Amino acid sequence: MIIDFHTHVYPEKLAEKTIKALGDIADVTPHTDGTLNGLMESMRRAGVDKSVILPVNTRAGQFDSITKFAKHINDTYDNLISFGGIHPDDEAPQEKLQYLKDNGFKGIKLHPDYTETFIDDERYIRIVSAAKKLGLLVITHAGKDPAYSTIHCPPDKGIKMLNAVNQRVPGETPFFIFAHLGGNRLLSDVETYLVGQNCYIDISCSFRDIGSFSTSSDEDIVRVIKHHGADKILFATDSPWNGQKEYVGRFKALEGLSDTEKEMILGTNAEKLLFP
């Protein structure tokens, strides 16, 4: 079982424009056309069994439209799992999270850069606390985003937020996921603040010679996995910004990880989170 825990798609009428705009900003060529069909064809080529789709609410008031599209995905496709999204300025965030929970969503995606809000802002702490209380997973973009000069989720602020949440809502079961090897282009801080903590790290945008985002070497990736624990690492690509086929092949070829560790990261860990 291979589960890609970090992908993006857009409604047909918006996909072409959105993909072009984001690709131009990041100076990267997408590997799919940004549609559901494009993602599923990519999965077929890569041998990916399931993909988690992460919507990004870039402004307040998008909850209804984004949730409608995400719910359609969940109701229609067996091999796609869409999370919900929420903006820190959305009205009645508790009610919105409850709606997601009641409608079978597994979790929510946060993007502090796109909302220009630091991850340890009280609004995010309240949202994440409410999500934890409801049993929802939470994943956030972490580290540098090529479209922004300010980093709104560096590792030190990320762990500060998580500690505040865990004080308000006690519970030892990890539910929070930091994307992009814990913090894109912030490897030293990731190893200082996040590695070994009670959270998950996904490996999207981690290989420095696949795509244009990361500066991490294979040795860096393996070291983070070993020190954090393979049981708390999730395979992820950030498709369409990285190719799933290339990513699967590159991860499988990593030296220094056992077959068991690779199996856990490719699918077992995600299965336990998504289908407890």
Image: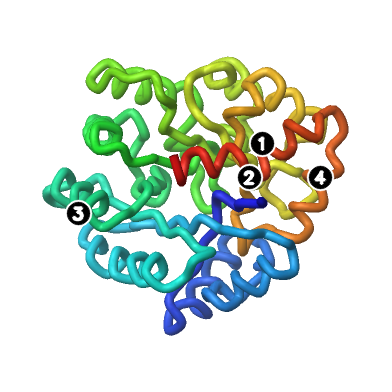
Identify residue for label 2: 267
Whole-angstrom CA distance, mark 3 to mark 1, is: 31 Å
Q: Nearer the viewer, mark 4 or mark 1?
A: 1
Mark nearer the N terminus (4 vs 1): 4
Q: Is residue 125 above or below residue 237?
A: above
* Badge 4 or badge 3: first in the primary sequence: 3
Front-lying residue, 217 or 7: 7
Nearer to us of marks 3 and 1 is 1
| Residue drawn at (43%, 22%) of the image | 159
Q: Amino acid at mark 1?
A: Met
| Residue 252: mark | 4
Is 83 displayed left or right of 248 in the figure? left
Give the CA separation, mark 2 to mark 3. Answer: 28 Å
Mark 2: amino acid:
Gly
Q: SS for tag 1? A: helix
Mark carried by residue 264: 1
Vertical placement of 29 versus 178: above or below?
below
